[in-house]
Image (spheres, grey):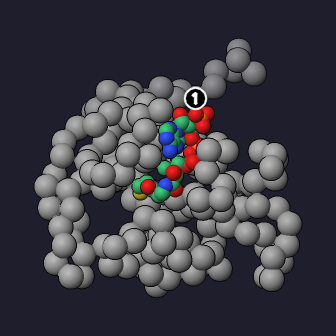
């Protein structure tokens, strides 16, 4: 498969069900299913949240191509929270996770975010390696952060990527002068 066969684009409401299924199967397995289609739909419609998908060209039943990955990030005042990111097992190690993350990173920079934060299951070595390769650093281990419906607990590892020094962004715009035109 070539890189060009995969397009990264904004998610739209019609993607909610497919994203929810990927979250259930590839991120939340064994933890209970919080990001069902209704919750994903709210995220897609929320103005403070960015949802992007990786789409394989070629038609499936809907004529829209097959979703091979997705990512959801929430924006605060200067901290962004990477809530979910997953790529289908059949499409891993092809650079799709990196391309999804690049889109979010660029958006976070444009929005003036100072840092990106995330949690992952403490035992998720693959994701840990991925985020390390993407310049995230581990900050803290939170025991018992995740709870399954059956009361099972699992620790979370928090990771961080700094984009700029925290604090106000210097105001750099100035009106054009006549001699500039
Ligand atoms: C983590 C995940 C999103 C990575 O997606 P991906 O598309 O396979 O990642 P990429 O191909 O863009 O990888 C970029 C780089 O990250 C590193 N990396 C990614 N997966 C890795 C793995 N399993 N082991 C070691 N390094 C890995 C490598 O340096 C890789 O570059 P390379 O392939 O040239 O060596 C994917 O494994 C996944 O969906 N996992 C299940 C869901 C999950 O755990 N999500 C994160 C918590 S929300």
**Which quadrant of the view contains residue 74?**
bottom left
**Which quadrant of the view contains residue 83?**
bottom left
Residue plotted at (66% across, 55% down):
91
Residue plotted at (48% across, 72% down):
25
Residue plotted at (60% across, 61% down):
88
Q: Nearer the viewer, residue 180 or 2?
A: 2
Q: Nearer the viewer, residue 48 or 126?
A: 126
Q: Nearer the viewer, residue 172 or 109?
A: 109
The percent coordinates of residue 168 (x first, y second) are: 31, 34
**Which residue is labeled 1 in the image?**
175
Q: Nearer the viewer, residue 179 or 72?
A: 72
Tell me: residue 118, above or below residue 105: below
Instruction: Count the labels in the image.
Output: 1
Q: Classify mark 1: helix, strand or loop.
A: loop
The percent coordinates of residue 5 (x first, y second) are: 81, 53
Toward the top, the furthest residue is: 179
Residue 78 visible in the current orientation? no
Tell me: residue 31, above or below residue 48: below
Q: Is residue 121 left or right of residue 41?
A: left
The percent coordinates of residue 125 (x first, y second) are: 38, 46
Is the residue marked by circle 1 packed among few (<14), some (14-19), or many (20+) residues within 10 Å?
A: few
The percent coordinates of residue 23 (x first, y second) are: 47, 70
- Quarter occupied by the C terminus: top right
Tell me: residue 139, above or below residue 89: above
Q: Is residue 148 left or right of residue 178?
A: left
Residue plotted at (43% across, 64% down):
27
Residue 155 visible in the current orientation? yes
Toward the left, the furthest residue is: 143
Q: Is residue 91 left or right of residue 135?
A: right
């Amino acid at each position: 498969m070539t890189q060009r066969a995969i397009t990264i684009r904004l998610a739209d409401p019609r993607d909610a069900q497919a994203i929810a299924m990927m979250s259930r199967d590839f991120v939340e397995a064994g933890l209970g299913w919080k990001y069902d289609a209704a919750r994903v739909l709210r995220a897609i419609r929320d103005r403070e949240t960015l949802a992007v998908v990786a789409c394989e060209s070629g038609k499936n039943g809907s004529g829209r191509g097959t979703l091979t990955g997705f990512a959801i990030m929430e924006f605060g005042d200067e901290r962004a929270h990477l809530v979910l990111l997953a790529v289908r097992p059949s499409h891993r190690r092809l650079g799709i996770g990196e391309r999804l993350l690049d889109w979010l990173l660029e958006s976070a920079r444009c929005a003036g975010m100072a840092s990106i934060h995330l949690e992952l299951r403490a035992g998720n070595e693959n994701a840990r390696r991925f985020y390390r390769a993407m310049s995230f650093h581990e900050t803290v281990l939170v025991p018992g952060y995740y709870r399954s419906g059956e009361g099972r607990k699992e620790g979370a590892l928090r990771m961080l990527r700094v984009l700029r020094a925290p604090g106000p962004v210097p105001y750099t715009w100035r009106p054009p002068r006549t001699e500039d035109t």
